[in-house]
Image (tube, helix red, strand yellow):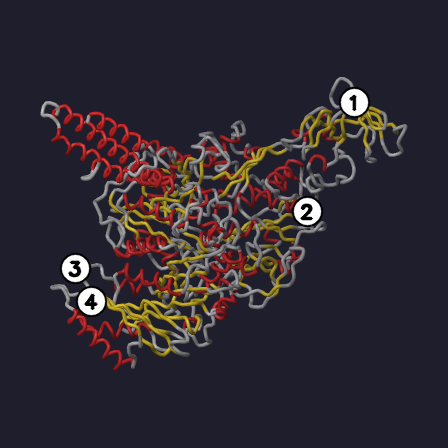
Amino acid sequence: MKLSYRWCEDFTHVSDIDPKRFADRMTDTGSKVECFERLAEDIENVVVARITKIEKHPDSDHLLVCLVDVGEESPRQIITGAQNVFEGAVVPAAKAPASLPGGVKIKSGKLRGLPSDGMLCSIGELGLTSHDMPGADNNGILILGDEFADKVGDDIREALLLSDVVFDYEITPNRPDCLSVIGLAKEAAVSFDRPYHIPTPEVPPVGDGDSVENYVKVDIEAPDLCPRYCAKAVKNVRIAPSPLWMRMRLRALGVRPINNIVDITNYVMLEYGQPMHAFDYGCLDGAHIRVRRAADGELYRSLDINAEDTPLTSSMLVIADEHKPVALAGVMGGANSEIRDDTHTVIFESANFDGVSVRRTSRAMGIRTESSGRFEKGMDPENAMPALLRACELVRLLDAGDVVDGVIDEYPGKRPVRTVKFEPDRINAFLGVSLDRDYMKNILEKLSFRVDGDTITVPSWRGDVECMSDIAEEVIRMHGYNEVETTLPLMRIAEGGRTERQRFDEELHSLLCGMGLWEATMFSFIGPRSYDMIRLPKDDPRRTSVVISNPLGLDTSVMRTTALPSMLEVLSHNQNHKNASAAMYELATVYIPTSPDTLPDERRVLVIGSYSSGDFFDLKGIVERVFMFAGVSGYKTVTVTDEPSYHPGRCARIVREGEVLATLGAVHPEAAANFGLSGDIYAAEIDIDRVFGLRETHVEFRHLPKYPSITRDFSFSCSEELEAGSIEEVCIKAGGKLVEDAVVVDVYRGIQVGAGRKSVSIRVTLRAADRTLTTEDADKVTEKMLRALSDELGIALRDR
Amino acid sequence: MKEKLLSIKKEAEAALRSASSDLEELRVRYLGKKGELTAVTRGMGALPPEERPAIGALANEVRAFIEGEIARLKAEREAEAKAEKLRAERLDVTMPARLPAVGGRHPLSQTQRDMEDIFLGMGFTIVDGPEVELDYYNFQALNMPEGHPARDTQDTFYITDKILLRSQTSGVQIRTMEKTKPPIRIISPGRVYRSDEVDATHSPLFHQVEGLVVDRGITMGDLRGTLLAFAKGLFGENTRIRFRPHHFPYTEPSAEVDVSCFVCGGEGCRLCKNEGWIEVLGCGMVHPNVLRGCGIDPDVYSGFAFGIGIERVTMLKYHIDDMRLLYENDLRFLGQF
């Protein structure tokens, strides 16, 4: 919403205030000024002038040499190329040196040898259009009417009412009353403690016996959607341009002048905030206005130039005559009742419509107008009548027609007056201030609240004020939010700090970063195609996602059930941008659907991805470090060949008591290729919620070993298929409690071992807690282990 | 005999002076059991007794001299050898370092953690909640019934009529108030969603930290004081705050909060667009309808709530001019923080 100083001046005097100060103070009192503009600021030294004499330029067939009275002692010689000038014409003249919009500078000079001491201006050169100046020639000099004859020498900015200061406000949805010049003028007046006066529109009766009832009957058939409908008739309409002052005010607020009747409706909407509509009475069938729900499929065409017939639904409210809709209530008029140049009689509508209904209709039809935008926020039905009368007052003032006596006022939705208890002590306690009761009362009364004892009567347009805290806001916004002294809450001590899980997550982040991984932040939504890209089969349960019903696009339309695609996306970005290597992670949320009516299960997974940062075993090391950090043990690494997103020969699961804790491996080359990735890509997905659940936080100290250990190395020749992990496992199991560790230290393949076979070396560390082991002890354990390996795995020591 | 001793001394001195001399060999030659000096002293018995003391003293003097010279030269040579070893081990320390591979937190996480730490220090608790949320918790319980115009200002992603992607983390506050009796002092950081197309300043997904305090006698002054403490913690001790009236359906009074520009301190610069102030927060006193809806009596308790965008603060802090950089996760970007 915009406000101009000139218009505001009708209601309160504030235009003497520096615009910056004005904007700051209004922002501080709750009407946020986004920006302000000084109109016509760039026009300088342009005046109203009269051409006294015109001669042809001796050296040009199109230039005219004019003597121009610019209000100075002697006339100036100004040369123009425009052909529409004549002697005696009143025109705008730029007196060199002068400035025009767009940074144009006018200097004295010579044209074809003759001096020219300025420039006669067209509308374009003054920054105006033919809407602002109806009838003006776009290609010629602006010829001002005779009413400017006595203004010769006056600054054009004043003569044409061009100069003004316009403030652009961001009005919050709770203050639709401020979507009006009057509303903002009142706020301005109270903000600067200036008096204000809102005149009551006057439409004296004509007394010719004619009445609006002779023209139209109004029936509100849907009173739930139309609390009030006011109408008046204007006959003998004389369509013409509006006067300059009205055009300039509309222009300043960003509305294009059209003609007097249309301009009046716009003017009143801006001034009162009340959307108005004017129907061509000649187009209303049956002298009847019905405010009703549309019939399903009923056709309507808006007065928009490109509009087509559009079917309506029964949830939409229309203004109809006996047979057809003539307007979409509160949204836009219909093409069939539009004001035309030959309109003879007009019905002015000033009504109140339900905001929710207007919004839904406006959305469904894809039409947003100044009118719908206002109704959506909830208009004050009390405002409808003054606005209607103001429109008729303007009709008389502009002589745009004859206002017919009588008024229609259907008002089924009159609201009770709201009162709120006045509790200055509570307000003070709530705000943390100590303001005087009378001081508060004074602020409230200036804001049109009536204060009688302990009762505050809320003005009809302040539907947002319902309780003590609303009153407190009214007081404190005028007193100053920044006047409230800063204090810290006096509160009982409560258990603050991070929860165990939050600490776990923080420490996990530190661990991962310490291991060289970079944290990524990825979108939680992906496209269903991502599931194809990571090669999930059609029936994979991970394809069942929470689906966004109004996504921005297909690629962001489902909530991810796996973080793998986002990770591959991120790796791909990095590889495409020539980052030599990458190792990244996200502690990602995934969303597992439950039932359509319940919220999904939101789970945290740790997804890791890398390229050119080590091999499978580096990744496995990172994953195992995470388990060590959590204190989770007793898990097994299981070979996996059928995880569709991973390489069938390079994928493992970490399993504990039948539960999968993690999947890791080389990403399937096809999946990697689907993301444009090349080379070996590694990824791991760790069920971190489960890991957290299994965590062991209790650490018990063990004595440092007192006795030396014995280390023995063994080499076995075995089939390529035999997993090294199983050799370790058998050794540890068979060796008993003397085995401190058994770990594969080397795997060798070569001619000596034979095709399809490998040699696995394992180092066993033996130690007893209570004595130094003897060779016999070690031999005994060794024998047990070798027997078990032979029995369970069918392998024997390699011949030396 | 005397001459003999003096010539040994002279000879030894010359031999020791030679740089290539083998000290051990010389020691054996002069001082060893079969050494020259030893041989002379052995022959002392043949001297007349009155000469013995003088010759003995001279012999001792010569021995002490040679021993001393050998020890001195030995120490000198050892020191030189050590120095030579150190010289040989010299490194060109200006050669490039081998950095250990470390990763790092995402800048958004860093900002979030900074914010969390400030509130944790004030005794707040961090509470998480669902991102896929019921309409009730995201809107209705926050004094935004269906059809409320304020819903328009937040274009929301819907799953069904009743389930949506939360457009603010305020639902967590409602859930907390339903479960917990005051005093309540929480922050709820997390992801929120609004259907904005991705561009330099918009993203359909971003992060917020919201906070809530409810107890008896909580005032707007407390709100101002808490946010001032927060702003100082986040932007520096000299930070000032400015409240501007605003409207949120779930708070009354409501305010937008500017902090004094942390680059120019309020003088006016490019970052603050010469305003001296930067808008960073929204806040207000919890609306009585919201408290009542959670079973908290607004006649007994009052409270305040606030919200701050993590992206916004992060972008301001590091002068990041394109929001998309935050979600691309380019290592050249992440490595800068």
**4 vs 1, front mark:** 4
Which class describes the residues within 10 Å of circle 1: few (<14), some (14-19), or many (20+)? Answer: many
Spot occupied by residue A109 in the image (x, y as percentages of width and height): 79, 25
Q: Amino acid at mark 4?
A: Leu
SS for callout 4: strand
> Tag 4, which chain?
A
Q: Which residue is mark 3?
A: A705
Q: Earlier in the sequence, mark 4 or mark 2?
A: 2
> Tag 3, which chain?
A
Disc 3 versus disc 2: distance between alpha carbons?
109 Å
**3 vs 2, front mark:** 3
Indicate left or right for B335 with A268 as reference: left
Spot occupied by residue B295 in the image (x, y as percentages of width and height): 27, 55
Q: Earlier in the sequence, mark 3 or mark 4?
A: 3
Q: Amino acid at mark 3?
A: Pro
Note whether B49 is above or below A83 in the view shown: above
User: At x 90% / y 29%, what residue is drawn?
Assistant: A59
